[in-house]
Image (cartoon, helix red, strand yellow):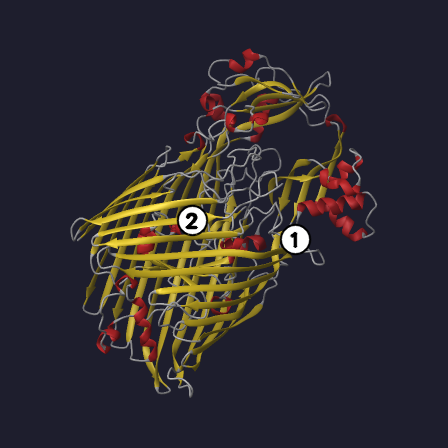
Amino acid sequence: MKKSVLSLAVLSAINMGAAAQDFSISEDDVVALEEVLVTGSLIPRTNFDGPSPVAVIDSSDIKGRGFSDLTDVLRSVSQATGGVQGEQFSNSFTPNAQEVNLRGFGAGRTLVLLNGRRLPDNPTPFNGQSNFFNFATIPLAAVDRIEVMTDGASAVYGSDAIAGVVNIITKKNFDNTIVTLQKGTTTEGGGDSTKLQAVSGFAFDRGEVTLTAEYQEQQPIYGKDRSWMDSYMDQPEELRFPQRGLLMVDPRTGQYLDPGAEACEQSGIGYEYATRPGSGNYCGFDGDGEESLRNYRERRSVFANARYELTDDIEAFASAMYWDSNAEVRGLRLWWGDYTLDQNLTHTYHQKVFSPAEAGEQDALYEESTWNITAGVSGDVALFGSYFNWEAAYTLGRYDYENTKTQFKEEAIREHFLGDTDLWGFGILAGNPDHSIYDFMPADVLAELTGVRRETAESESQQFTVSMVGDLFDMPTSKIPAAIAVQFEYADQSYDLSQDDRTLNQQGMGWFAITGTEGGGDRARTALGVELSLPVLDNWEVSLASRYDRYDDDSDVGGRISSQVKTRYDIADQVSVRGGWSQSFRAPDMHYLYAAESGFYTTTQDFYKCSVDGGVAYDDWGTCDEVQVAGARQGSLELAEETGENINVGLVFNPVEDLQLAVDWYRIDLSNIVLDEDIRQLMRDEAECRLGMSANEDYCDLLYSKVERVTNPALNMNQDLSQVNVIPINQSKLTQEGIDASVQYEFSTENFGSFELAMTYSFITKYEETILEGDKPNDLLQDLSHFEPRTKLNGGVTWVFGDFRSTLFGQRLGSMPNWAETERLDNAWTTWNLSLGYDVTQNLGVSLSATNVLNERPPEDETFDTWPYFHRGQYNAVGREVFADVVYRF
């Protein structure tokens, strides 16, 4: 590295924990160190405190806060206020993935980088709709620090940097070997874990190599492991009924046909004779808590960083990562249900939920792997009387995925229970007298009726970048010269999601009650970006950036220019103001573009039937009951990019040495947000068309193709809802304003060691959503159906005394609406983590840590009438988890 102004950036690489020591840095020392690029800029800086707010979490912070998982670290960030679908959603599309949702804008609207470069997306879509990044694929052993930029950055990075950027920086320049063994468990049961990590490095004449490896095995946690959610008896008293396992219903009256106690209690099935007031008797079971809250998983990973000086001015570098995982997810039991119609026109619905005694535990198996390699060269060149650093790098990555689970073959289970006799020609069978739902099903019979459903997916990405950065010219009003960075980028990405032949079969040869989504496509991208740093004065910096992205795919994006203006002004040595304006965008998600036609199940209100059959007036349509309906969706190639604008203004205050206070106000406007068509709105518009309340015939004809209805006298069906068809469209707008605040303070004492205090706070002051053009904005802060908090706080105190180190770290998630959507819960959710570490010798260290040390449960919600009785997208049921670590340094 040459002795330019950019060389001063090395100072930020010095460990902040050693700030109190006396370091004397010569020019030779500076030359040997490395420049630091801060997330959000292509120009190296002297520190992380620039025009854009960037939160930095280093490896010592991660360890001290008690976290053993990268996802937990990122979800603790105060700006991560959005709900997620993780392991607690065992029946979702992605129950083995771990995502982060900054600002509540969705997992796909945060750009994730590894050492400043993109990684392959998770190849299966979040909620069956959109692609996202799975943080489970990054081994914590390889992480040196995490930089979280909570501002739009498309002018630097292109698409996806809307809610922010997460840049994971890996270890390098490591000159020893450290091995860590960790054992963990939860105090309420389940979740035993083992983790083995090794980090090693060595230097040689003209280069260095850093290697990391990690192995982790995590035992599952089931709802049955938690006494407060292991039974239907944990529900409100009026809802304490066993789940309906063996059930026969007269669909004309809705009444259960009494099976008798003997049918329920026969040996080997494990059901109990139960009653639901107003409905009748049935065979029930206590299935609450059977699903997994945390999956069984086994993970292995390796990571390597290397560099080699080819000449005095040119250096080669490379990195490689491999990760694979096996996981087991336990969701709903195997079940079957269908109708019979006999010669007496007796119409009956039959349902059987199979017991573990018959079918065993129904675990879905997930096998995933991903790899990523980067290789490049960099060097210095003299241009225009100054030194410029140039770099050319190529990155290639791939993600492979397979999911398997036992399911019933549709035609086999139908014939087993219904036979093959259709007495009336309605397609409704008379039933098989030899097989009753009350009979125990032997293993050999079950094996003939079932098979293994298989879903496979893969994604790939590659990126080639060429960049140059250096001092541009001297500024007449500043001692610091202007700097410029130019970057050219070519990239492409692809994905393919495939189901087996049965999953999407519509001719009665599929898997019973199972559907799925397929898709696949590719896109290429070419981009050119320029960034300028202009020190107008010694204490005033202005940063300008603009980038052009050209997309080659089947969407309507084409080209997109993103620009930004940011500034920082030091009013005095203790006070600085910062702020800026930036544009952001997100190219249409690949699965929104290329999703093949696929199915799903949902609930909605049928306003037309509610009006015709129930006599409910238009003004009272909001009182119509929810009904379940099958849906179908597919991608759309007519999508355009989502666009956004970000504004931030902040104040940084250093009243005394080692104390920093920062407050930033932000506003984010997003437009053209891609969402699936709103089913409830389609149902309302369709009802208005059928009732003659709309004069738009073309729109009504379109609605009749989207909202399908059926008439079948045998089933007492007249224009009953059968399927709703949707596609994604650019439709929604979001506006969010808020305040982020932080405090950092370090001080030392003569007799009691040193202390470090850090705290961050995020407060959403405005959050509005407009679904359709011309609609009145919906105030999400007052909307009781919007399950996200308004505030989030975290903070910790670290005490270092000789060879002893301790950290107390707390998190507070603000209140949420109750499940009934009638009011907000009274309580926030506050949890504390505690870690204690001691260096026994120079080579041996031990530590104990606990997350949620007070074993705080999610806030009680008496209206939450379904398992698990809390909002699992925001809270978790893990409870207190304790870890013991042994670290040995060679």
Report the side of 792 relative to 34 (left or right): right
Q: Which amino acid is tagged 1?
A: Asn
**How far across and how far down the image is residue 747, in percent?**
30, 61
Mark 1–mark 2 contact, CB under 8 Å?
no
Q: Which mark, by number, is residue 778?
A: 1
Report the side of 172 relative to 354 (left or right): left
Task: Mark yes or no: residue 379 visible.
Answer: no
Instruction: Please tell me which residue is depicted at 43% across the width and 68% down the height of the picture.
Output: 652
Q: Which amino acid is tagged 2?
A: Gln
Q: Choose between 802 and 123: the one closer to the eye.
A: 802
Give me the C-alpha separation between circle 1 and circle 2: 29 Å
Q: Which mark, by number, is residue 79?
A: none
**Would you identify the image quadrant in which residue 53 lies?**
bottom left
Q: Determine the secondary structure under disc 2.
A: strand
**How far across and how far down the image is residue 517, in percent?**
56, 45
- Tag count: 2
Query: Which residue has dot 2 on it?
Result: 811
Q: Choose between 344 and 118: the one closer to the eye.
A: 118
Q: Choose between 804 and 117: the one closer to the eye.
A: 804
Q: In which quadrant of the rendered image does the N terminus lie? A: bottom left
**How far across and how far down the image is residue 224, in percent?**
43, 29
Question: Up-down: is 358 above or below 365?
Answer: above
Q: Residues within 10 Å of mark 1 (few under 14, many from 20)?
A: some
**How far across and how far down the image is residue 290, in percent?**
46, 30
Question: Up-down: is 551 above or below 347?
Answer: below
Q: Determine the secondary structure under disc 1.
A: strand
